[in-house]
Image (cartoon, helix red, strand yellow):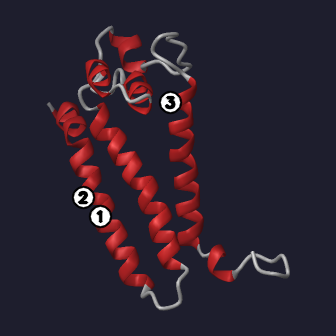
Amino acid sequence: MNLTGKIKPSLREPYIIVNTVLATVIFLVFIYSFIFSPEKDNYPVVCVHEKITGEPCVSCGLSHSFSLIVRGRIAEAQQYNIYGLRVFLFFAAQLAMRIYFSLLYVRPAVIRRNLIIYDIAGSVIIFLLAFNQFFLWLIG
């Protein structure tokens, strides 16, 4: 906001709005991980795949894993889902990237097109690194 109480035009750019929404959703996922705990096993979302088939899927235990990671219990988190840390780091990196790229985007000297290309390329790379096992599970 500026001194007149109006939102700066650069903050109304679609890129900034998308980054703000994504950062908020990721932040809410981390809050969810803090609120619910494996000890209480009070998670409101259950695995639909496991409920229907009776067999766990590759994402089973991610909520438990995230909850343990935010509490610093990394080794325990891997017992619930071996890919939990990888996925958690993806979301943590995305949160940092949304904030960092948004701050760069509103700077006057930045070439926005290049910034968006770097953002997309970096996001795709870390997405593939974090979720490659999920794709392998789906096709195999």
Which of discs 3 and 2 lies nearer the camera? The answer is 3
Q: What is the secondary structure assignment of the residue under circle 2?
A: helix
Expressed as whole percent of the image width and height from the top left, the position of residue 119 reads 36, 68
As helix, strand or loop, the secondary structure at mark 1 comes to helix
Relative to residue 136, is residue 81 depicted above or below? above
Q: Earlier in the sequence, mark 1 or mark 3?
A: 3
Residue of label 2: 125
First of labels 3, 2 by sequence position: 3
Mark 3 is on which residue type? Answer: Ser
Count every numbered label the image shows and give the total. 3
Locate residue 67, reporting x and y percent: 44, 26
Q: Which quadrant: the N terminus?
A: bottom right
Point out the residue furthest to the bottom here.
109
Distance of mark 3 from mark 2, alpha carbons? 25 Å
Q: Please name the residue shown 55% across and 13% down the image.
A: 42
- For marks 1 and 3, give the one nearer the viewer: 3
SS category of the residue bearing label 3: helix
CB contact under 8 Å: marks 3 and 2: no
Judge left or right: residue 68 versus residue 3. left
Disc 1 target residue: 122
Q: How far apart are marks 1 and 3 (CA)?
A: 25 Å
Mark 1, other Cα within 10 Å: few <14 / some 14–19 / many ≥20:
some
* Near-viewer residue (15 or 73): 73
Would you identify the image quadrant in which residue 81 lies? top left
Q: Which residue lies furthest to the front in this view?
A: 72
| Residue lying at the far right of the rendered structure | 4
**Is 60 placed left or right of 63 in the picture?**
left
Q: Name the residue under label 3.
A: 33
3D distance between C-alphas at marks 2 and 1: 5 Å
Give the residue displayed 53% in from the left and 84% down from the top.
107
